[in-house]
Structures are given as structure tokens and as C-alpha cells.
Image (cartoon, rainbow, N blue to C red):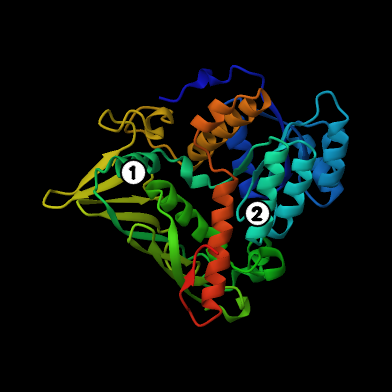
Amino acid sequence: MFNEEMRSEQPLRWAMVGGGRGSQIGYAHRSGATRDGHFQLMAGAFDIDADRCRDFGTNLGLSADRCYADYLTMFTEEAKRDDGIQAVSIATPNATHYPIAMAALESGLHVVCEKPVTFTVVEAEDLKRIAQKHNRIFGVMYGYAGFQMIHQAREMIQRGDIGEVRVINMQFAHGFHAQEVEKNDPGAKWRMNPAVSGPTYVLGDIGTHAFYMAQLMTNLDVESLCCTRQSFVKSRAPLEDNAHVMMQFSNGAVGTLWASGVNAGSMHQQKIRIVGEKASLEWWDERPNQLSLEIQGEPARVLERGMSYLHKDSSAVDSDRIGGGHAEGFFESWSNIYSRFGVVMKAANRGDQATIDATWYPDIDAGIEGVRLLERCVDSADNGAKWVKYHD
């Protein structure tokens, strides 16, 4: 069961860049960060419009003089204060992640960043180098990875419960962008603009979620991949609203990733299916408290969150916030991740490397792999869906 007594130290003084009025993801960050007492919102550069930023921030309870017109001013002014911020979350469009994260790290701040963290692997590795130089934690917000049954699956696979992994099927295929919704939706519009979104749309926006969770579950490395991508809504070209990726893994396993915004009628269809030599596991984010287990020659069964038969030493157990049978959801997942960010950031502040090493959290390496996936997919798709090596 989740231990709410972990908050033995003072909350980290925390700020946000982006995530202002009307931002769903901004609220998810604030809810996840503050729920368990690891973070306290002290400042923000929530909006590029200074008046809107100040109005929004003061409505959240912040002092007007800590609602800043831009992130550079915030980092500079907060550094002058005895109670200045110690960490920042970046919830802005993709093109801004790299400069904001770099400035935050150089200002001595821990960072939580939305994904994809950068446009290129070179940039992402640069952020890793700077974070290490300043002994700062860099967390990447793979928000679904806090669901407990993801970690139950990870433990089962690592223990060999399903045998050697043979097939990995990943998908995140919703239908909300089956039409040209970006005409009237600013939140969708920037995602279809390559200058802001980067070289991909659905692969970066949602495909990286499924890819990260499959990596987390299996700990397998991709050796090569082949990608085909389409712009079914023609105005979105060159960015894709549908993509299929085939992968070869280091142990001989094969995999597929389907990322789509045009799967008409679908809510999410984010599913991860891991097929082993003895059994298969499947997790679906619309039923996140359950994990399907299908053992060859036996009746299919469903494992439920919060039950005593789960592996006791996995994150599936220590992240439970209430007993089995009660539904836990998206905000619990985010809170689980932010609690881990808080633990490792505080550990870094006191020089406790052992705690950092012992604590799972989506780190900068997870962010780098997401960007690497996108680079390789674009390389493959834009060259006739050729097979490309995953690593240089």
C-alpha cells in the first residue's frame, strides 16, 4: 500500500512553465505534483501573455510577483530569493522543451518535462549531460507508467513467468482527430505544425507512450525498425496522423507499434500485449486496474490491482492508494510518478545516490529513447519504409 508518510522532508518549491488556463495537461501536472506533499507550487510562467499569466496564477493562490511573463525572468528572479524554486515542470509545445529545460538545468533546477523532450537525440543527450553536470534530476512525464499493473507485468516478465518474450504488440490509436479538428482547436493545431510539434505528430504525441511502457515491461532493446506513416487528413502533411512500425528486438523478438489519431470511434485503444513462449500478458489503459494473463492450455484470467496474489516486491503493490476493487485512474498514475520524482529530487539535494539508484522513475534516458524512436521512424518512412538500425 502507498506510504503517505514518505513526505518526511519539506516540499520542494516548484514552478511550472506553461499549463495555464484551459490546459488539461497543466491541471494533471499540478494535481499529480501536489497530491502527496512532495511539491508546493510557488511560481509560474503559465502563459505567454503576462496579464493572463498573472490572473491565472493569482487565482491558484500565488503571489502576483511570482507570476512571470517568461521563463527566463522567472528563473533569474527566483534565484535571488531565499525561498526560490527548486524544481520546474515544462508543459509547453514541443519546440520549446529544449531551450526551457536547458535554462532550467543551468539555473540549478530539477526538471520534469513533457515528451518528446527534444526534436533530436543530440539535443536530448545534451540535456542529460547538463543534468549530470549539475547533479539535477531530469524526469520525463510518461503519465501512464504510474499504473500499478504495468509494473506487475514488468515483474512477471523479468521473473520468467511467461517465458522468453517473442512478440510485442503496442498501440495507441484514438479516433478524436479523424476529421480536421485543428481548424477550431488550438491545442490540436500546434500538434500538426512541424515547426512546433517536430518531425512527427501521432508517433511523438501518443506512440511514445506505448513504446515506453513496452520497454519498461520487457527491458528489451530495439535493433532495427521499419515505419510507414500516412496523412489521411491531407492538410497535416508532412506530419502523420497514422503510422505502423515493425521492430526487431535484441533477443530475437518482433514487435509492432500502431499510432493513430484517425481510428474512428475509438476512445484510446492504448494496449500493450506481450507474447511469451508460455503465456501472454495484455494491458489496456481504458481498464488500467486489470492485467490479462493467458497461459497456454489454461483458461484466460484477469489479474486485479490491489490483490494479495500480485508480486509483493513490485511497484504494483507499493503504489496502491486504496484496496482492490476500487478503481484507480489517470490522476493516481500521475501522482505515483510525481511522488517518485519528489523522492529522487530530494535524494539528489542531500547527495543520496543510493536512493536514486533504487527508485524507478521515467528519467532522461527514457526521454532519449523516445526521441530516438521518432528519428528512426522518420528516417525509415521518408525513405520508402526501409529497415533502419535503431542505434547508430
Please, what is the three-letter code of the amino acid marked with disc 2? Ala
Q: In this view, does 61 lie above or below 142?
A: above
Q: Position of residue 388 (x, y in %)?
A: 49, 72
Please, what is the three-letter code of the amino acid marked with disc 1? Ala
Identify residue for label 1: 153
**Which is more toward the observer, 357 or 46?**
357
Identify residue for label 2: 124
Q: Residue at x 66, y 64 (%)?
A: 197
* Distance (Cα) linking label 2 and label 1: 28 Å
Q: Where is residue 35 in the image (x, y as percent from the top left)?
A: 58, 29
Q: Position of residue 368 (x, y in %)?
A: 58, 53
In the rendered view, does 42 fall on the left or right side of 347? right
Q: Residue at x 72, y 44 (%)?
A: 130
Front of the two marks 2 and 1:
2
Q: In this view, does 58 lie above or below 71?
A: above
Q: Is residue 21 above or below residue 244?
A: above
Res 199 visible: yes
**Which is more toward the observer, 120 or 41?**
120
- The crowd level at tag 1 (other Cα within 10 Å; few <14, some 14-19, many 20+) is many
Q: Which residue is drawn at 39% across and 47% down?
A: 217
Under circle 2, the secondary element is helix
Task: Determine the residue located farthest toward the front in the rendered image.
Answer: 392
Q: Which residue is drawn at 41% across and 66% down?
A: 247
- Whether residues under marks 2 and 1 lie with C-beta atoms below 8 angstroms apart, the answer is no
In the rendered view, does 16 fall on the left or right side of 280? right
Q: In this view, does 237 lie above or below 352?
A: below
- The crowd level at tag 2 (other Cα within 10 Å; few <14, some 14-19, many 20+) is many
Res 267 visible: no
Occupied quadrant, residue 29:
top right
Occupied quadrant, residue 124:
bottom right
In the rendered view, does 207 fall on the left or right side of 350? left
Q: Earlier in the sequence, mark 2 or mark 1?
A: 2
